[in-house]
Amino acid sequence: MKFASRMQRLGTETAFEVLVRARALEAQGRDVVHLEIGEPDFDTPANVAAAGKAAIDAGWTHYGPAAGQPDLRQAIADYINRSRGTAYGPENVVVTPGGKPIMFFLILALLEAGDDAIYPDPGFPIYRSMIDFVGARAIPLPIREENDFRLDVAELASLITPRTSFLIINSPANPTGGVLTRADLEAIAQLAVDHDLFVLADEIYSEILYEGEHHSIAVYPGMAERTAILDGFSKTYAMTGWRLGYGLMPVELANEVSRLMVNSVSCTASMVQRAGLEALTGPQDDVRAMVEAFRRRRDLMVEGLNRIPGISCLNPAGAFYVFPNITGTGMGSKEFADRLLEEFGVAALSGASFGEHGEGYLRLSYANSEENLRKALDRIEAAAPATVAAR
Ligand SMILES: Cc1ncc(COP(=O)(O)O)c(C=O)c1O
Protein backbone atom coordinates (compact mmCIF):
# COMPACT_ATOMS: atom_id res chain seq x y z
CA MET A 1 0.00 0.00 0.00
CA LYS A 2 1.27 3.48 -0.78
CA PHE A 3 0.85 5.96 2.02
CA ALA A 4 0.88 9.74 1.73
CA SER A 5 4.38 11.02 2.47
CA ARG A 6 3.12 13.03 5.45
CA MET A 7 2.50 9.75 7.29
CA GLN A 8 6.26 9.29 7.60
CA ARG A 9 6.39 12.48 9.64
CA LEU A 10 3.74 11.38 12.13
CA GLY A 11 5.08 10.38 15.55
CA THR A 12 3.39 8.51 18.39
CA GLU A 13 3.03 8.20 22.15
CA THR A 14 5.26 5.45 23.56
CA ALA A 15 3.02 5.04 26.62
CA PHE A 16 0.49 3.09 24.57
CA GLU A 17 3.19 0.80 23.10
CA VAL A 18 4.68 0.04 26.52
CA LEU A 19 1.18 -0.68 27.83
CA VAL A 20 0.72 -3.29 25.08
CA ARG A 21 4.08 -4.91 25.91
CA ALA A 22 3.23 -4.93 29.63
CA ARG A 23 -0.15 -6.53 28.96
CA ALA A 24 1.51 -9.22 26.81
CA LEU A 25 3.83 -10.07 29.73
CA GLU A 26 0.83 -10.22 32.07
CA ALA A 27 -0.90 -12.59 29.66
CA GLN A 28 2.10 -14.92 30.17
CA GLY A 29 1.47 -14.82 33.93
CA ARG A 30 4.02 -12.12 34.88
CA ASP A 31 3.23 -9.52 37.53
CA VAL A 32 3.72 -5.96 36.23
CA VAL A 33 3.34 -2.66 38.13
CA HIS A 34 1.99 -0.09 35.71
CA LEU A 35 3.75 3.26 35.95
CA GLU A 36 3.66 3.96 32.23
CA ILE A 37 0.26 5.38 31.46
CA GLY A 38 -0.76 8.96 32.20
CA GLU A 39 -4.15 8.57 33.75
CA PRO A 40 -5.61 8.72 37.26
CA ASP A 41 -6.27 5.27 38.71
CA PHE A 42 -9.41 6.64 40.42
CA ASP A 43 -12.90 6.10 39.10
CA THR A 44 -14.83 8.97 37.56
CA PRO A 45 -16.72 10.70 40.45
CA ALA A 46 -20.09 8.99 41.02
CA ASN A 47 -22.16 12.15 40.42
CA VAL A 48 -20.46 12.62 37.04
CA ALA A 49 -20.92 9.01 35.97
CA ALA A 50 -24.58 9.20 37.05
CA ALA A 51 -25.10 12.35 34.97
CA GLY A 52 -23.66 10.57 31.93
CA LYS A 53 -25.97 7.57 32.41
CA ALA A 54 -29.01 9.78 33.00
CA ALA A 55 -28.17 11.75 29.86
CA ILE A 56 -28.41 8.59 27.74
CA ASP A 57 -31.85 7.83 29.21
CA ALA A 58 -32.91 11.44 28.69
CA GLY A 59 -32.15 11.17 24.98
CA TRP A 60 -28.80 12.98 24.72
CA THR A 61 -27.93 10.50 22.00
CA HIS A 62 -28.05 12.74 18.93
CA TYR A 63 -25.67 15.06 17.08
CA GLY A 64 -25.05 18.42 18.70
CA PRO A 65 -23.35 21.70 17.77
CA ALA A 66 -19.78 21.22 16.45
CA ALA A 67 -18.25 23.58 19.02
CA GLY A 68 -20.10 22.00 21.94
CA GLN A 69 -23.38 22.40 23.83
CA PRO A 70 -24.03 26.10 24.68
CA ASP A 71 -24.49 25.56 28.44
CA LEU A 72 -21.30 23.49 28.67
CA ARG A 73 -19.34 26.15 26.74
CA GLN A 74 -20.68 28.75 29.17
CA ALA A 75 -19.75 26.60 32.20
CA ILE A 76 -16.24 26.10 30.81
CA ALA A 77 -15.78 29.85 30.21
CA ASP A 78 -17.03 30.54 33.76
CA TYR A 79 -14.68 27.96 35.27
CA ILE A 80 -11.64 29.23 33.36
CA ASN A 81 -12.44 32.87 34.19
CA ARG A 82 -12.88 31.96 37.87
CA SER A 83 -9.67 29.96 38.09
CA ARG A 84 -7.45 32.13 35.83
CA GLY A 85 -8.89 35.63 35.97
CA THR A 86 -9.56 35.69 32.21
CA ALA A 87 -12.61 37.17 30.48
CA TYR A 88 -13.75 34.48 28.05
CA GLY A 89 -17.30 33.96 26.80
CA PRO A 90 -18.87 30.77 25.43
CA GLU A 91 -17.96 31.91 21.90
CA ASN A 92 -14.27 31.41 22.80
CA VAL A 93 -14.77 27.76 23.76
CA VAL A 94 -14.54 24.68 21.53
CA VAL A 95 -15.39 21.34 23.15
CA THR A 96 -13.51 18.35 21.70
CA PRO A 97 -13.23 14.58 22.30
CA GLY A 98 -10.33 14.90 24.80
CA GLY A 99 -7.81 17.72 25.03
CA LYS A 100 -5.55 16.19 22.38
CA PRO A 101 -7.61 17.29 19.35
CA ILE A 102 -7.07 20.90 20.40
CA MET A 103 -3.35 20.42 19.64
CA PHE A 104 -4.14 18.70 16.38
CA PHE A 105 -6.67 21.29 15.21
CA LEU A 106 -4.70 24.37 16.29
CA ILE A 107 -1.56 23.18 14.58
CA LEU A 108 -3.53 22.30 11.43
CA ALA A 109 -5.18 25.71 11.50
CA LEU A 110 -2.11 27.83 12.23
CA LEU A 111 1.08 26.18 10.93
CA GLU A 112 2.51 25.22 7.55
CA ALA A 113 5.83 24.79 5.75
CA GLY A 114 7.98 27.86 6.34
CA ASP A 115 6.87 28.30 9.95
CA ASP A 116 8.97 27.46 12.98
CA ALA A 117 7.27 26.19 16.13
CA ILE A 118 9.03 25.95 19.48
CA TYR A 119 7.99 23.11 21.76
CA PRO A 120 9.25 21.77 25.12
CA ASP A 121 11.78 18.90 25.07
CA PRO A 122 11.23 16.72 27.04
CA GLY A 123 7.53 17.28 26.41
CA PHE A 124 4.29 15.61 25.39
CA PRO A 125 5.30 13.72 22.20
CA ILE A 126 2.25 14.72 20.19
CA TYR A 127 3.42 18.36 19.99
CA ARG A 128 6.40 17.47 17.85
CA SER A 129 4.48 14.82 15.95
CA MET A 130 1.85 17.32 14.83
CA ILE A 131 4.31 20.10 13.99
CA ASP A 132 6.26 17.67 11.79
CA PHE A 133 3.05 16.32 10.26
CA VAL A 134 1.92 19.71 8.92
CA GLY A 135 5.39 20.35 7.46
CA ALA A 136 6.42 23.15 9.83
CA ARG A 137 9.84 23.08 11.50
CA ALA A 138 9.85 21.79 15.09
CA ILE A 139 12.37 23.62 17.28
CA PRO A 140 12.99 21.89 20.63
CA LEU A 141 13.29 24.05 23.72
CA PRO A 142 15.36 22.11 26.29
CA ILE A 143 13.69 21.73 29.67
CA ARG A 144 16.46 21.24 32.20
CA GLU A 145 16.63 19.70 35.65
CA GLU A 146 19.06 22.49 36.73
CA ASN A 147 16.19 24.92 36.16
CA ASP A 148 13.70 22.84 38.18
CA PHE A 149 12.27 21.59 34.89
CA ARG A 150 11.01 25.08 34.01
CA LEU A 151 11.84 26.46 30.60
CA ASP A 152 14.70 28.97 30.58
CA VAL A 153 13.36 32.27 29.24
CA ALA A 154 16.78 33.44 27.94
CA GLU A 155 17.20 30.17 26.07
CA LEU A 156 13.70 30.54 24.63
CA ALA A 157 14.56 34.07 23.45
CA SER A 158 17.69 32.73 21.75
CA LEU A 159 15.64 30.27 19.66
CA ILE A 160 13.21 32.84 18.24
CA THR A 161 13.81 33.83 14.60
CA PRO A 162 11.68 35.80 12.10
CA ARG A 163 10.18 32.43 11.05
CA THR A 164 9.00 31.59 14.56
CA SER A 165 5.24 31.94 14.81
CA PHE A 166 4.16 29.38 17.39
CA LEU A 167 5.17 28.41 20.91
CA ILE A 168 3.89 25.56 23.07
CA ILE A 169 4.13 25.74 26.85
CA ASN A 170 2.87 23.13 29.30
CA SER A 171 2.51 23.80 33.02
CA PRO A 172 2.21 21.73 35.16
CA ALA A 173 4.20 19.63 32.75
CA ASN A 174 4.20 16.14 31.40
CA PRO A 175 6.67 14.36 31.75
CA THR A 176 8.60 16.33 34.39
CA GLY A 177 5.95 17.72 36.76
CA GLY A 178 7.66 21.12 36.36
CA VAL A 179 5.60 24.27 36.98
CA LEU A 180 6.25 27.70 35.47
CA THR A 181 6.30 30.65 37.89
CA ARG A 182 4.34 33.86 37.47
CA ALA A 183 7.61 35.61 36.57
CA ASP A 184 8.34 32.99 33.90
CA LEU A 185 4.89 33.43 32.38
CA GLU A 186 5.15 37.20 32.37
CA ALA A 187 8.53 37.07 30.61
CA ILE A 188 7.29 34.50 28.09
CA ALA A 189 4.23 36.69 27.41
CA GLN A 190 6.49 39.66 26.72
CA LEU A 191 8.50 37.60 24.21
CA ALA A 192 5.28 36.41 22.55
CA VAL A 193 4.01 39.96 22.15
CA ASP A 194 7.38 41.33 20.99
CA HIS A 195 7.85 38.59 18.38
CA ASP A 196 4.21 38.09 17.40
CA LEU A 197 4.04 34.45 18.53
CA PHE A 198 0.87 32.46 19.04
CA VAL A 199 0.99 30.45 22.28
CA LEU A 200 -0.63 27.09 22.90
CA ALA A 201 -0.83 26.88 26.70
CA ASP A 202 -1.42 23.25 27.62
CA GLU A 203 -2.95 23.50 31.08
CA ILE A 204 -4.49 20.02 31.28
CA TYR A 205 -2.83 19.43 34.70
CA SER A 206 -3.90 22.81 36.14
CA GLU A 207 -5.83 21.27 39.04
CA ILE A 208 -3.13 18.75 39.92
CA LEU A 209 -0.88 21.20 41.69
CA TYR A 210 0.68 20.74 45.13
CA GLU A 211 1.89 24.24 45.94
CA GLY A 212 0.45 27.65 45.17
CA GLU A 213 -2.15 28.51 42.54
CA HIS A 214 -2.29 27.80 38.85
CA HIS A 215 -1.46 30.77 36.61
CA SER A 216 -2.22 31.15 32.93
CA ILE A 217 -0.23 33.11 30.37
CA ALA A 218 -3.57 34.22 28.86
CA VAL A 219 -4.00 36.96 31.49
CA TYR A 220 -0.99 39.08 30.53
CA PRO A 221 -1.47 42.18 28.35
CA GLY A 222 -1.83 41.38 24.67
CA MET A 223 -2.09 37.62 25.32
CA ALA A 224 -5.82 36.85 25.08
CA GLU A 225 -5.69 37.43 21.32
CA ARG A 226 -2.63 35.23 20.83
CA THR A 227 -3.26 32.35 23.25
CA ALA A 228 -5.19 29.12 23.17
CA ILE A 229 -5.66 27.40 26.53
CA LEU A 230 -5.96 23.62 26.30
CA ASP A 231 -7.66 21.95 29.27
CA GLY A 232 -10.14 19.17 29.83
CA PHE A 233 -11.74 16.59 32.05
CA SER A 234 -9.39 13.61 31.54
CA LYS A 235 -6.98 14.27 34.39
CA THR A 236 -8.96 16.49 36.79
CA TYR A 237 -12.06 14.29 36.88
CA ALA A 238 -10.46 10.93 36.06
CA MET A 239 -12.39 10.85 32.76
CA THR A 240 -9.70 9.73 30.29
CA GLY A 241 -11.93 7.16 28.58
CA TRP A 242 -14.91 9.49 28.23
CA ARG A 243 -12.92 11.69 25.82
CA LEU A 244 -13.82 15.23 26.83
CA GLY A 245 -11.59 18.29 26.57
CA TYR A 246 -11.67 21.85 25.29
CA GLY A 247 -9.79 24.89 24.12
CA LEU A 248 -10.32 28.62 24.77
CA MET A 249 -9.13 30.93 22.03
CA PRO A 250 -9.91 34.07 20.05
CA VAL A 251 -13.33 33.83 18.36
CA GLU A 252 -11.99 33.83 14.78
CA LEU A 253 -9.75 30.88 15.64
CA ALA A 254 -12.57 29.11 17.52
CA ASN A 255 -14.61 29.34 14.31
CA GLU A 256 -11.82 27.71 12.29
CA VAL A 257 -11.35 24.96 14.88
CA SER A 258 -15.13 24.36 14.77
CA ARG A 259 -14.84 23.90 11.00
CA LEU A 260 -12.17 21.28 11.63
CA MET A 261 -14.59 19.59 14.06
CA VAL A 262 -17.28 19.54 11.34
CA ASN A 263 -14.78 18.02 8.93
CA SER A 264 -13.58 15.32 11.32
CA VAL A 265 -15.74 14.12 14.22
CA SER A 266 -18.82 16.41 13.75
CA CYS A 267 -19.22 16.95 17.49
CA THR A 268 -18.20 15.59 20.88
CA ALA A 269 -20.48 12.82 22.23
CA SER A 270 -23.64 14.48 23.54
CA MET A 271 -24.14 12.44 26.74
CA VAL A 272 -20.46 12.89 27.58
CA GLN A 273 -20.88 16.66 27.47
CA ARG A 274 -23.77 16.40 29.98
CA ALA A 275 -21.44 14.50 32.32
CA GLY A 276 -18.87 17.27 31.84
CA LEU A 277 -21.41 19.90 32.85
CA GLU A 278 -22.05 18.00 36.08
CA ALA A 279 -18.28 17.67 36.67
CA LEU A 280 -17.77 21.44 36.45
CA THR A 281 -20.87 22.54 38.31
CA GLY A 282 -21.24 19.74 40.91
CA PRO A 283 -19.25 19.12 44.13
CA GLN A 284 -15.45 19.14 43.80
CA ASP A 285 -14.63 16.96 46.86
CA ASP A 286 -13.50 13.99 44.79
CA VAL A 287 -11.01 16.16 42.90
CA ARG A 288 -9.53 17.45 46.17
CA ALA A 289 -9.30 13.94 47.63
CA MET A 290 -7.58 12.68 44.48
CA VAL A 291 -4.99 15.48 44.53
CA GLU A 292 -4.26 14.79 48.23
CA ALA A 293 -3.73 11.09 47.42
CA PHE A 294 -1.39 12.07 44.56
CA ARG A 295 0.55 14.30 46.95
CA ARG A 296 1.16 11.41 49.37
CA ARG A 297 2.21 9.14 46.53
CA ARG A 298 4.54 11.79 45.11
CA ASP A 299 6.24 12.11 48.49
CA LEU A 300 6.59 8.34 48.73
CA MET A 301 8.10 8.07 45.25
CA VAL A 302 10.50 11.01 45.56
CA GLU A 303 11.77 9.81 48.92
CA GLY A 304 12.06 6.19 47.76
CA LEU A 305 13.84 7.06 44.50
CA ASN A 306 16.34 9.34 46.23
CA ARG A 307 17.33 6.44 48.50
CA ILE A 308 18.42 4.33 45.51
CA PRO A 309 22.13 4.71 44.65
CA GLY A 310 22.58 6.08 41.14
CA ILE A 311 19.14 7.71 41.03
CA SER A 312 18.12 11.23 42.04
CA CYS A 313 14.72 12.80 41.78
CA LEU A 314 13.41 16.37 42.06
CA ASN A 315 10.17 16.96 43.92
CA PRO A 316 7.67 17.93 41.20
CA ALA A 317 5.15 20.66 42.02
CA GLY A 318 2.38 19.37 39.75
CA ALA A 319 0.91 16.61 37.54
CA PHE A 320 1.30 12.95 38.62
CA TYR A 321 4.71 12.07 37.23
CA VAL A 322 8.23 11.90 38.62
CA PHE A 323 11.17 12.24 36.25
CA PRO A 324 14.15 10.70 38.06
CA ASN A 325 17.69 11.20 36.83
CA ILE A 326 19.20 7.74 36.27
CA THR A 327 22.58 8.73 34.82
CA GLY A 328 24.31 7.45 37.98
CA THR A 329 23.24 3.91 37.11
CA GLY A 330 25.41 3.99 34.00
CA MET A 331 22.48 2.81 31.92
CA GLY A 332 20.69 4.63 29.10
CA SER A 333 17.03 5.52 29.54
CA LYS A 334 15.60 3.01 27.09
CA GLU A 335 17.95 0.29 28.28
CA PHE A 336 16.87 0.86 31.88
CA ALA A 337 13.16 1.07 31.00
CA ASP A 338 13.36 -2.16 28.96
CA ARG A 339 15.23 -3.94 31.76
CA LEU A 340 12.66 -2.74 34.29
CA LEU A 341 9.79 -4.08 32.25
CA GLU A 342 11.25 -7.32 30.98
CA GLU A 343 13.28 -8.48 33.98
CA PHE A 344 11.74 -6.72 36.98
CA GLY A 345 8.06 -6.21 36.12
CA VAL A 346 7.80 -2.40 36.24
CA ALA A 347 6.35 -0.61 33.22
CA ALA A 348 8.07 2.78 32.96
CA LEU A 349 8.81 5.12 30.09
CA SER A 350 12.22 6.14 28.83
CA GLY A 351 12.76 9.88 29.26
CA ALA A 352 14.08 9.93 25.69
CA SER A 353 10.61 9.06 24.38
CA PHE A 354 9.69 12.64 25.33
CA GLY A 355 12.54 14.14 23.26
CA GLU A 356 16.32 13.94 23.16
CA HIS A 357 16.71 16.13 26.26
CA GLY A 358 14.84 13.46 28.22
CA GLU A 359 17.78 11.05 27.86
CA GLY A 360 19.17 10.12 31.27
CA TYR A 361 15.70 10.08 32.88
CA LEU A 362 12.70 7.81 33.34
CA ARG A 363 9.10 8.91 33.52
CA LEU A 364 7.12 7.18 36.22
CA SER A 365 3.43 7.88 36.70
CA TYR A 366 2.47 7.58 40.37
CA ALA A 367 -1.23 7.27 39.61
CA ASN A 368 -1.19 3.86 41.29
CA SER A 369 -1.79 2.51 44.82
CA GLU A 370 0.81 3.12 47.56
CA GLU A 371 1.22 -0.65 47.84
CA ASN A 372 2.07 -0.93 44.14
CA LEU A 373 4.37 2.09 44.31
CA ARG A 374 6.31 0.46 47.17
CA LYS A 375 6.58 -2.73 45.15
CA ALA A 376 7.80 -0.72 42.15
CA LEU A 377 10.42 1.08 44.26
CA ASP A 378 11.82 -2.24 45.51
CA ARG A 379 12.01 -3.52 41.95
CA ILE A 380 13.65 -0.35 40.64
CA GLU A 381 16.23 -0.61 43.40
CA ALA A 382 16.92 -4.21 42.43
CA ALA A 383 17.22 -3.21 38.76
CA ALA A 384 19.61 -0.28 39.32
CA PRO A 385 23.14 -1.47 38.47
CA ALA A 386 24.69 0.99 40.95
CA THR A 387 22.94 -0.89 43.75
CA VAL A 388 24.46 -4.13 42.57
CA ALA A 389 27.92 -2.54 42.44
CA ALA A 390 27.51 -1.06 45.91
CA ARG A 391 26.79 -4.43 47.49
C1 LIG B 1 0.43 17.40 28.50
C2 LIG B 1 -0.81 16.72 28.01
N1 LIG B 1 -1.65 17.40 27.24
C3 LIG B 1 -2.77 16.84 26.76
C4 LIG B 1 -3.09 15.54 27.03
C5 LIG B 1 -4.31 14.95 26.38
O1 LIG B 1 -5.31 14.63 27.21
P1 LIG B 1 -6.67 13.97 26.68
O2 LIG B 1 -6.67 12.57 27.18
O3 LIG B 1 -7.76 14.80 27.29
O4 LIG B 1 -6.71 14.05 25.21
C6 LIG B 1 -2.25 14.79 27.84
C7 LIG B 1 -2.55 13.38 28.12
O5 LIG B 1 -1.74 12.58 28.50
C8 LIG B 1 -1.08 15.40 28.36
O6 LIG B 1 -0.22 14.73 29.13
Image: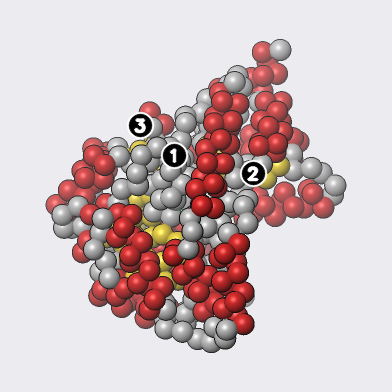
Percent of width and height locating residue 50? 60, 69
- The local crowd at label 1, few if under 14, some if 14 to 19, many if 20 or more residues have their Cα within 10 Å, is some
Q: Is mark 2 on a helix, strand or loop?
A: loop
Q: Which quarter of the figure has residue 254?
A: bottom left
Residue 243 against residue 201 in the figure, above or below = below
| Marks 2/3: CA–CA distance | 28 Å
Q: Which of marks 3 and 1 is nearer the N terminus?
A: 3
Q: Mark 3 points at which residue?
A: 147
Which amino acid type is shown beneath numbered disc 3? Answer: Asn
Q: Do the residues labelled 3 and 1 touch (CB within 8 Å)?
A: no
Q: Which amino acid does label 2 sit on?
A: Asn
Q: Can residue 97 be seen in this view?
A: no
Name the residue tied to disc 2. 368
Q: Distance between the residues labelled 3 and 1?
A: 18 Å
**Residue in view at x 29 percent, y 75 percent:** 91
Q: Nearer the viewer, mark 2 or mark 3?
A: 2
Residues 226 and 285: in front is 285
Secondary structure at numbered mark 1: loop
Label annotation for residue 286? none
Q: Dot 3: few (<14), some (14–19), or many (≥20) neighbours within 10 Å?
A: few
Q: Confirm or deny contact between disc 2 and disc 3 (CB under 8 A).
A: no
